Amino acid sequence: TTSAEPNPLPRFPADFVWGASTAAYQIEGAAEEEGKGPSIWDTFVRRQGAVRDGHTGDTACDHYHRFGEDVALMRRLGLDAYRFSISWPRVLPTGEGKVEARGLDFYDRLVDALLEAGVEPTPTLFHWDLPQALEDEGGWMSRATAHRFGEYAAAVAGRLGDRVRRWITLNEPFVHMSFGYGFGVHAPGRALLLDALPVAHHQLLGHGLAVAAIRAAAPDAQVLIANNCSPVRLRSDADAATDRQAADAYDVLHNRLFNDPLLTGAYPDLGAYGQPDPGWGGIVRDGDLDVIAAPLDGLGINYYNPTWVTAPADPAGGLPFDLAEPEQAYPRTSFDWPVVPDGLTELLVGLKARYGTALPPVWITENGCSAPAGLEDRTRIDYLAGHLDAVARARAQGVDVRGYFTWSLLDNFEWAEGYHQRFGLVEVDFATQARTPRASFEWYRALIASQKS
Ligand code: GBH
């Protein structure tokens, strides 16, 4: 097709890793097969009004039964690596105790199929599908969940650690905290607002325990976390002082709450959130930050767009910022998210400026866009080309970016939006499960091939 002509792109190093990402609940289906226990998403999708048009992930892309076909697509694409997630309740139906061998067998077969296809398996241990039984005991509001996560990590790494060289612990702990426990628009659907803060700490503690478990099982493996980060921007009519304060406060909640403890061993000051106690009233215990700050082999960054904020209209009320709309007319994705590639350069250069030598190598673990249905997805090609150029610019400014995983390989279950948003390089017809590569697939294939020749 004419739209498959590669845009001119800078050359990346020969060992730069080209990948694509998915997540278990969004693609696997087989929600009740082979001993899998219910996750909080299995529960949440049945709640009236929770997901657009009542869509569920019961079948999704039926990847559980069709992974062979999907791995063949990856091989055709020439992927170096594939980022997928492991469903905790498939491996441990109630989140703890006895391993369900059939669940672990599935990932064992997937890993072997990937290696056979020359694609590096890059599993994420938690992409939001907590076992419902653990949610019934408090979920991530409960400290015990962090320990259960460490045990789950040990079980998975014990089985796959002989073949998996690169692991990701958590996906986007900020989104899971804020959407899942703060606003209730994702599972588990709790609207605790700022009382959801312990969810941040318990996920990070779970991350640290998982790092130790993976290192014990697979000493040579690399361990990463995938944080979604968003550079914070002000409108051009911003007031210097109060708007700057709002931007700093937003940066603390969205970015630094997760990056600082991992990379510096200390939380940012949460005074702007009415939390003067560095121990957050007993949540952060002695020694926890040492566990959380265990050295990482890489920092995964999921980037979609910047966030615009202003000073709060009601400073006495809830949050120390208001979200704002940019006044500039950026192109918009089908999700209505602004397309701002230079935000990715700004984010990466900003991380390097803030953390310096404490910043490990960076991996773009998600980046992509929702585009109209159909095969001629020119807007997706433009989005990807623009953001890869942004990565190259950050590399040129000294940020050590090692790889790029686009979101997503396949159209899939887009959480509260159900099947209405399509993020795939491959179109999925959910009535027939037919997979058809889009123009962007061909473009990405040609790009990867050209980078290797
Ligand atoms: C990721 O989350 C998830 O990891 C993945 O599962 C998901 O399918 C994918 O992205 C696509 O959504 O209101 O215009 O400022 C992304 C988290 C949070 C990023 C909301 C964009 C708001 C855009 N997203 N955010 S805007």
Image (tube, grey):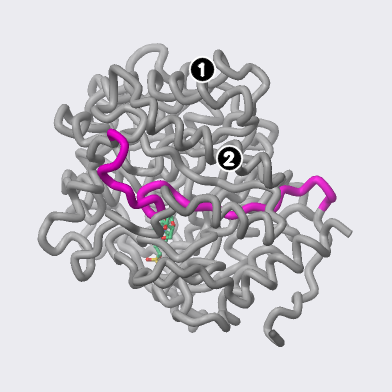
Q: Residues within 10 Å of mark 2 (few under 14, many from 20)?
A: many
- At a point 44% along the width and 28% down the height, the residue shown is 207
Residue 31 drawn in magenta: yes
Q: Is residue 156 left or right of residue 403?
A: left
Q: Residues within 10 Å of mark 1 (few under 14, many from 20)?
A: many
Q: CA distance from mark 2 to mark 1?
A: 18 Å
In the rendered view, does 17 fall on the left or right side of 355? right
Looking at the picture, which amino acid does disc 1 mark? Ala
Which residue appears at 22% of the width and 47% of the height?
42
Relative to 30, is 378 on the left or the right?
Answer: right
Residue 296 belongs to the span the image colors magenta: no
Percent across and percent down for residue 428 are 45, 69
Report the span colored magenta: 13-35
| Coordinates of residue 219 in the picture (x, y in percent) | 63, 17
In the image, taking residue 103 as reference, residue 76 lies left or right, namely right
Q: Which mark is residue 122?
A: 2
According to the picture, the residue beneath numbered tag 1 turns out to be: 212
Q: Secondary structure at mark 1?
A: helix
Secondary structure mostly seen in magenta is loop
